[in-house]
Amino acid sequence: MKYMLLVYSAENSWTEEEWFACTEESAELCRELAAKGQFLAASPLHPVATATSVRVRDGQRQVTDGPFAETTEQLGGYYVIDVPSLDDAIAFAARIPPATKGTVEVRPIFELDGLPD
């Protein structure tokens, strides 16, 4: 089953050295999953200050800078994995370095027919 792991943490909780170590460790975890054929995608995101939010209300597009909601933890990255069970996805999420400073949300992905690969 495919899962998306959404990584949240406070952007200011990482020193430059910690962030570099986190990305190195995360890349190693991705290589480990790839060797098992379970890795689909992963990437850190640019800071929340670079975000743009788009909404359509009453047929009118509204574009604003930043995320929709003010929170102490921002979406900082994601993984898309294909593992046998939710327990496997949770076990992997617990190994992601940002889980020590923030939250990793694990969500099953709906498989929709008719979408391009």
Image (tube, grey):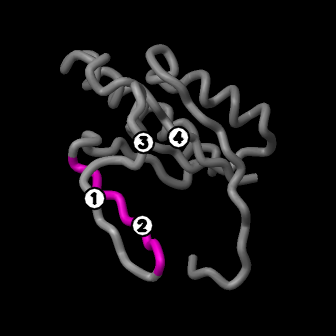
Q: Position of residue 11 (x, y in %)?
A: 30, 27
Q: Residues within 10 Å of mark 3 (few under 14, many from 20)?
A: few
Which residue type does callout 4 highlight?
A: Leu
Q: Nearer the viewer, mark 4 or mark 1?
A: 1
* Left or right of 103, for residue 91: right
In the figure, residue 48 lies in which quadrant?
top left
Read off the residue under disc 4: 6
Q: Return the disc, 2 or 1, that comes first in the chain's sequence.
A: 2
The reply to whether the C-beta atoms of the residues labelled 2 and 1 are less than 8 Å apart is: yes
Secondary structure category for the residue under label 1 = strand
Q: CA distance from mark 4 to mark 3?
A: 16 Å
- Quadrant of the drawing holding the C terminus: bottom right
Q: CA distance from mark 3 to mark 2?
A: 13 Å
* The residue stretch that appears in magenta: 50-58
Read off the residue under disc 3: 69
Front-most of residues 54 and 35: 54
Residue 24 is labelled as: none
Which residue type does callout 2 highlight?
A: Arg
Q: Nearer the viewer, mark 4 or mark 2?
A: 2
Residue 55 is labelled as: 2
Instruction: Say if the magenta span includes residue 117.
Output: no
Front-most of residues 14 and 38: 14
Q: Main secondary structure of the magenta part?
A: strand
The reply to whether the C-beta atoms of the residues labelled 3 and 2 are less than 8 Å apart is: no
Read off the residue under disc 1: 64
